[in-house]
Amino acid sequence: MKPALTGWARMRSAVITRLLLSAALSSASFLCHAEGALLKVPTREGVTTTLFWEPVPNAKATVFLFPGGGGGFGKVEDGKAMGQNFLVRSEPYFLANGFNVAIFGRPSDSQDLDYADRISDTHMADVRKVLEFVKNKAEVPVWIVGTSRGTISATAAAINLPGAIAGVVLTSSVVSYKKPGAVPKQDLDRIKVPVLVLHHAKDACPHCQPFEVSAILRGLKNAPVKKEIMVSGGENPTGNVCEALHWHGYIGMEREAVNLIAEWIKRPVN
């Protein structure tokens, strides 16, 4: 026979049991939030727009991401978006900074979001509905973050959806005046939320030349806070200079780039 436990021993055993149970529940909670979901949001009559959504416990904010190129976030496998776009592949770093992540995909009636598409009324209608859906999922501030061609969408949303967002982050912005919807060509003086402009000093994409980035800041006449950060880190760029694995996509410095964005969102300053 085992000796009977004393009162103190029984109390100690109960405390240990509760601690172990609490740890197990915490672990289970973490696992529940370790995977995102592919959602389809009705945005226009007969049209749904894809959304990748991954929340975190006690989120400080939601980042609403606009990838570049033709849009989208690639396949979703095991609860993770598999696209190589800078914002998509950097999603874990946004989560680690305490942000819910919403990645805007594509509408069911289009396979490509070209430059002109991203400033169209139909695109803004889709963005509005997806934003409303995301805000209903979590009652925290929403910050729009765009990269490359996604900066056109992010800028247009900030202009056309006043009051819906807390601020905007533009990374690898399209600044060439030859492109429809180029950020400096839009009505930037209508943006009245904080704006961060992050760019890589070695970005060789002809549509995103670093020396033209200052035009964005000049146009933001009514933004309460506006800041430009020009970075130069990273390593091993490969492929097309306008694609995700070159300096244009912050290759080799994804965590650093996201941390800069996250710290500024938490405390936006000029």
Image (cartoon, helix red, strand yellow):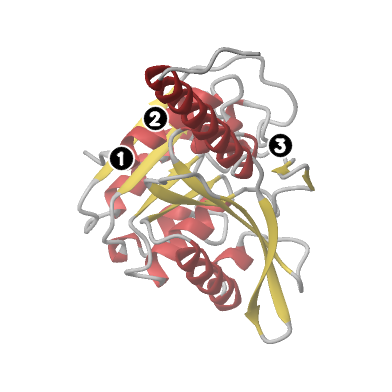
Q: Residues within 10 Å of mark 3 (few under 14, many from 20)?
A: some
Left or right of 155 in this view: 3: right
Dot 1: element: helix
- Residue at 36%, 48% (x, y): give it: 216
Mark 1 sits on what residue?
A: 266
Q: CA distance from mark 1 to mark 2?
A: 10 Å
Q: Give how far across and how far down residue 252 sits, in percent.
A: 59, 19
Q: Closer to us: mark 3 or mark 1?
A: 1
Label 3 to label 1: alpha-carbon separation: 26 Å
Q: Secondary structure at mark 2?
A: helix
Q: In the depicted view, which residue is nearer to us: 15 or 78?
A: 15
Who's the residue at 39% across and 30% down the image? 260
Please indicate whether residue 157 sits to the left or right of residue 148 in the image: left
Q: Nearer the viewer, residue 34 or 150?
A: 34
**Percent position (x, y) of residue 1?**
66, 13
Q: Quadrant of the C terminus?
A: top left
Quadrant assignment, res 116: bottom right
Image check: 109 left or right of 226?
right
Callout 3 amino acid: Gln
The vertical placement of 217 against 24, above or below, is below
- Residue most extreme to the front: 1
Sequence-wise, the earlier of marks 3 and 1 is 3
Q: CA distance from mark 2 to mark 3?
A: 20 Å
Place of residue 17 in the rendered image (x, y in percent of width and height, measured from the top left): 51, 28
Of 24 and 29, which appears nearest the observer? Answer: 24
Amino acid type for the residue under numbered disc 2: Leu
Residue at the disc numbered 2? 260
Task: Please determine whether, in this image, residue 235 is positioned above or below residue 217.
Answer: above
Whether residue 69 is visible here, answered yes or no, is yes
Kind of residue at disc 1? Lys
User: What residue sits right under mark 3 in the picture?
Assistant: 84
